[in-house]
C-alpha cells in the first residue's frame, strides 16, 4: 500500500501541477491561537500546547510565515517613544525628521492582535528628500537562521513560507505615505513619486535576489491585493511589471511564488494569470467579497492556484451550523484532489471562530479522497 503524502508534499504537488492524495488543508490560525493563549481560553486539551502541535493533532498542515532577510537603516538615528497605547518612531535625517505612529487599542491588546499604523512618515512632498535619504541607507541582508529553524521544526508537517514583503508601490502606500495621501501624491506629483518608486524597486529586487539564494521554497509577495485599492489600470502599470521581473528571478532559482490576495479579486485574477505568480494565497470568496469560489477557479483557468476558499465568517456566530455545512458540501463537490487548489480560510481563522467548525473541515478533508 502506498504511503500517504505529507502536508508539505501535498502543497508542493499542487504548486507544481501534480496530483496530491488529498486536498492540501492549511488554515491560518495564528490570530485565533494568539488571542486564546493570551486570554487563557484555549480548550482544556490544548491549554499548554503550541499552535504547531495543535495543527498536527487536528490533522491540518502548518502554515508558518518566515523571513530570510533583514533590513537596516544604516547611519540613521531612530528614536522610539511610548505614549499610552501609541508607539512613536522618529527618524532623523539632514532633511528633517520623519515620524510614524503605531497603536494597539485595549481590545486588540487583550486579544494579542498586532498594532496598526495611524500616522505615516510622509505627510506631503516636503518629506520626499528625507524619505529618499532613508531609502538610500536601507541595507538588505540575508538572514537564513530563523527560516532554517522554522523549516526544521515544522518538517514535512507543513511549510515555512518565505515572506518577501510588498512590491514597490504597495510599500510606498502602506509603509511610508498611507493609501490616501500616497494616491494623492502619485496623481499630483507623478515624477517625484516615480523617483521614489524606482528606488523602492531596487530595494525590492535586492530582497528578491536574497530570497532566490535562500533555502525558501514558497515565496509570498505580501501585497494584500484588492481591486478597491489596485484597479486593473494601476495593477498593469505598477504591479504586473514587477511581478514578472521578480518571478523570473525566483522561478530560475526553483521557487514557487504566491501573492497575498485577500480582498476583491475578480477583476485582478485574469491579470494575475499572466503575471508569473503561481498562486493567490488567502483568497477570500463570497459572501465576504464579490467573487465566488466557482468564479475564482474559472478565472484562474488552471494557470493559477487558488489558495483559500473558506470565508472566515462561516466559522463564527451568527452564521448557523446548517449554512456552514451547506458551504462545505458545495466546496467539496466543487474541488477535488488534483485541482489547482489549496484549502485555507480567507484570510484568517478569527478569535471568534468555533474550533469545532475547523475540526469539521479537517474531517471532510480526510474523507474526501
Image: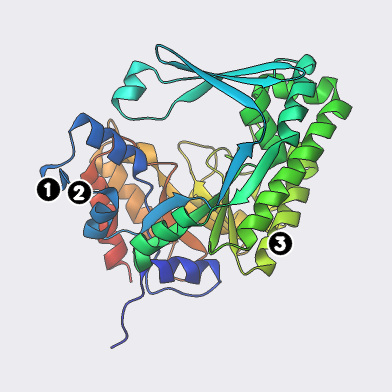
The answer to which quarter of the image holds residue 198 is top right
Residue drawn at point x = 30 percent, y = 28 percent = 111
Residue at mark 1 to residue at mark 2: CA–CA distance: 8 Å
Choose the circle earlier in sequence order: 2 or 3. Answer: 2
Residue 42 locus on image (x, y percent): 18, 39
Residue 311 locus on image (x, y percent): 41, 42
Task: Please report contact status of discs 1 and 2: CB closer than 8 Å, yes or no.
Answer: yes
- Rendered image: mark on residue 49: 2
- Rendered image: mark on residue 249: 3
Q: Nearer the viewer, residue 325 or 88?
A: 88
Outermost residue toward the right in this view: 191
Residue 71 locus on image (x, y percent): 60, 41
- Rendered image: mark on residue 234: none
Q: Is residue 363 visible?
A: yes
Residue drawn at point x = 37 percent, y = 30 percent = 113
- Left/right placement of residue 82 relative to residue 118 reads left
The answer to which quarter of the image holds residue 136 is top right
Label 3, secondary structure: give it.
helix
Crowding near the residue tagged with mark 2, few <14, some 14–19, many ≥20 C-alpha atoms within 10 Å: few
Crowding near the residue tagged with mark 1, few <14, some 14–19, many ≥20 C-alpha atoms within 10 Å: few
Residue occupied by mark 1: 45
Label 1, secondary structure: give it.
helix
Q: Nearer the viewer, mark 1 or mark 3?
A: 3
The answer to which quarter of the image holds residue 231 is top right
Amino acid at each position: 500500500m502506498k504511503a500517504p503524502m505529507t502536508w508539505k508534499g501535498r502543497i508542493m504537488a499542487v504548486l507544481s501541477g501534480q496530483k496530491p492524495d488529498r486536498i492540501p488543508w492549511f488554515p491560518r490560525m495564528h490570530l485565533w491561537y494568539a488571542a486564546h493563549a493570551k486570554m487563557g481560553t484555549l480548550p482544556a486539551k490544548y491549554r499548554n500546547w503550541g499552535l504547531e502541535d495543535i495543527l498536527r493533532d487536528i490533522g491540518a498542515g502548518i502554515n508558518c510565515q518566515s523571513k530570510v532577510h533583514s533590513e537596516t537603516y544604516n547611519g540613521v538615528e531612530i528614536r522610539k517613544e511610548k505614549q499610552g497605547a501609541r508607539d512613536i518612531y522618529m527618524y532623523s535625517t539632514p532633511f528633517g525628521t520623519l515620524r510614524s505612529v503605531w497603536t494597539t487599542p485595549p481590545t486588540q491588546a487583550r486579544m494579542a492582535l498586532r498594532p496598526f499604523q495611524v500616522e505615516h512618515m510622509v505627510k506631503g512632498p516636503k518629506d520626499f528628500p528625507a524619505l529618499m535619504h532613508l531609502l538610500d541607507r536601507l541595507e538588505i541582508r540575508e538572514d537564513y537562521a530563523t527560516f532554517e529553524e522554522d523549516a526544521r521544526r515544522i518538517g514535512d508537517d507543513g511549510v515555512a513560507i518565505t515572506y518577501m514583503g510588498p512590491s514597490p508601490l504597495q510599500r510606498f502606500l502602506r509603509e511610508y505615505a498611507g493609501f490616501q495621501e500616497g494616491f494623492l501624491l502619485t496623481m499630483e506629483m507623478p515624477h517625484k513619486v516615480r523617483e521614489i518608486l524606482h528606488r523602492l524597486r531596487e530595494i525590492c529586487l535586492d530582497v528578491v535576489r536574497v530570497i532566490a539564494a535562500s533555502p525558501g521554497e514558497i515565496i509570498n509577495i505580501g501585497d494584500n491585493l484588492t481591486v478597491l485599492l489596485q484597479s486593473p489600470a494601476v495593477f498593469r502599470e505598477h504591479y504586473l511589471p514587477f511581478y514578472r521581473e521578480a518571478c523570473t528571478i525566483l522561478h530560475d532559482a526553483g521557487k514557487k511564488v504566491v501573492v497575498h490576495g485577500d480582498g476583491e479579486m475578480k477583476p485582478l485574477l485574469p491579470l494575475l494569470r499572466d503575471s508569473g505568480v503561481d498562486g493567490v494565497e488567502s483568497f477570500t470568496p463570497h459572501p465576504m467579497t464579490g467573487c465566488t469560489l466557482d468564479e475564482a477557479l474559472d478565472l484562474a483557468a488552471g494557470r493559477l492556484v487558488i489558495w483559500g476558499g473558506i470565508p472566515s465568517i462561516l466559522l463564527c456566530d451568527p452564521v448557523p451550523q446548517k449554512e456552514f455545512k451547506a458551504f462545505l458540501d458545495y466546496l467539496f463537490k466543487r474541488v477535488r484532489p488534483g485541482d489547482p487548489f489549496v484549502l485555507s480560510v480567507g484570510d484568517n481563522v478569527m478569535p471568534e471562530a468555533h474550533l469545532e467548525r475547523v475540526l469539521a473541515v479537517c474531517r471532510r478533508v480526510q474523507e474526501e479522497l
